[in-house]
Image: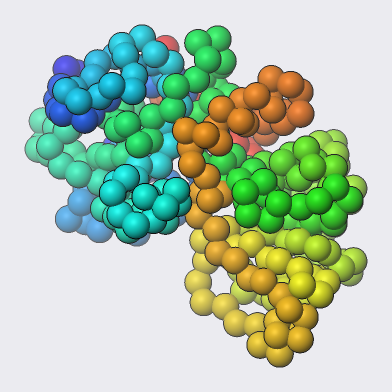
Amino acid sequence: MLIRAALVEQAGGPFVVRDVEMASPAAGEILVRIEAAGICHTDLALRGRWPAARLPMVFGHEGAGAVEAVGDGVPAVVVGDRVCLSFRSCGECGECRGGRPAYCLRSLVNTQGVSGVLRSGAGPVFSGFFGQSSFATHAMAYVSNTVTIPADFPAVLAAPLGCGVQTGAGTILNVLDPAPGDRVIIFGAGGVGLSALLAALTRSCEVIVVEPQPARRDLALSLGAADAVAPGAELPSAHHAVDTTGRPDVITQAVGALRRRGTLALVGMGGTTSFDIMTVMAGGLNIRGVIEGDAVPADFLPHLIELQRAGRFPVEKLITTYPFADIEQAAQDTLTGKTVKPVLTFD
């Protein structure tokens, strides 16, 4: 079948929307007609350094839409089901069997893309990013990363739940698990950081946000943050901290802001960092890397939908929509900080 997809044809190049041919779903595959797709910083970071041997590539890993066809051996969904797509996991390794699919031992394979599903006039197109490649009118997904959602829940709200929102909210609810009244400091007020803020507020925490952009500090305050300050400001000691930046200087500040036996969750993509070991030891501090909020999507995404419908998790306040044709503009607005959480919409 002929579909439209946003291709990255050279590392660091723009998204270019083209017609491509898509194969029918094979055994275990689920064909989803995409209604909305969130743009995550991971898409933008990886398109800049994607290997030439695996180009052109279709990115996108926050898709939502309706099931259009299923391959053999797919009992979980039927044609017409509305679904949210998340990260793929193998279901067979020790981490998956232990209920920790975010740490699947085949996660690299599930992320790097496959050949054979899509083809353009110039040859094969790589897809299967996080088991979906949802920057397209249709995506091929799998049972492990396809979550059924209520038929009346808007795809624009469902799409970003699959990664960025899940990462921020899950870091709070699944990993840090704060008690009411705990102080949480969140470094970075992008989609992940503000999702963490919304989640912490459901636990009645006192939340301080550290963010360089004044508009995003204002947004954090409007969402319920107790304070929003610029980097370098003096901070009170906190029970928990979340770093979404991956910046060594910010991580050092986060460690210094923790009270004894406090916990720092690292969720931002970054390089090498260092901190004083004695500070960590003497304070009994915990430093915890987190992928996808430690979530099991089939369980966690419905919980987030329940919170949103109850008015306790207003993720809609983070979202700006763009037509699919304007994907490159949406990407640039994300990189400049103009947009917190861009979501592409499809006719």
Residue 246 rendering spot, x and y as whole percentages: 58, 65
Which quadrant holds residue 147? top left
Between 314 and 270, the residue placed more toward the observer is 314
Residue at 18 percent of width and 39 percent of height: 125
Residue at 74 percent of width and 56 percent of height: 186
Residue 75 rendering spot, x and y as whole percentages: 28, 21
- Residue 308 appears left or right of 301: right
Between 72 and 135, the residue placed more toward the observer is 72
As displayed, is residue 135 above or below residue 265?
above
Between 346 and 122, the residue placed more toward the observer is 346
Residue 260 rendering spot, x and y as whole percentages: 81, 75
In the picture, the quarter occupied by the C terminus is top left
Residue at 76 percent of width and 61 percent of height: 240
Which quadrant holds residue 9? top left
Residue 78 rendering spot, x and y as whole percentages: 31, 14
Residue 63 appears in the picture as rendered:
no
In the picture, the quarter occupied by the N terminus is top left
Which quadrant holds residue 342? top right
- Residue 116 appears left or right of 321: left
Most distant residue in the bottom direction:
278
Between 259 and 254, the residue placed more toward the observer is 259
How many labels sit on residues? 0
Residue 191 appears in the picture as rendered:
yes
- Residue 30 appears left or right of 162: left
As displayed, is residue 171 above or below residue 21?
below
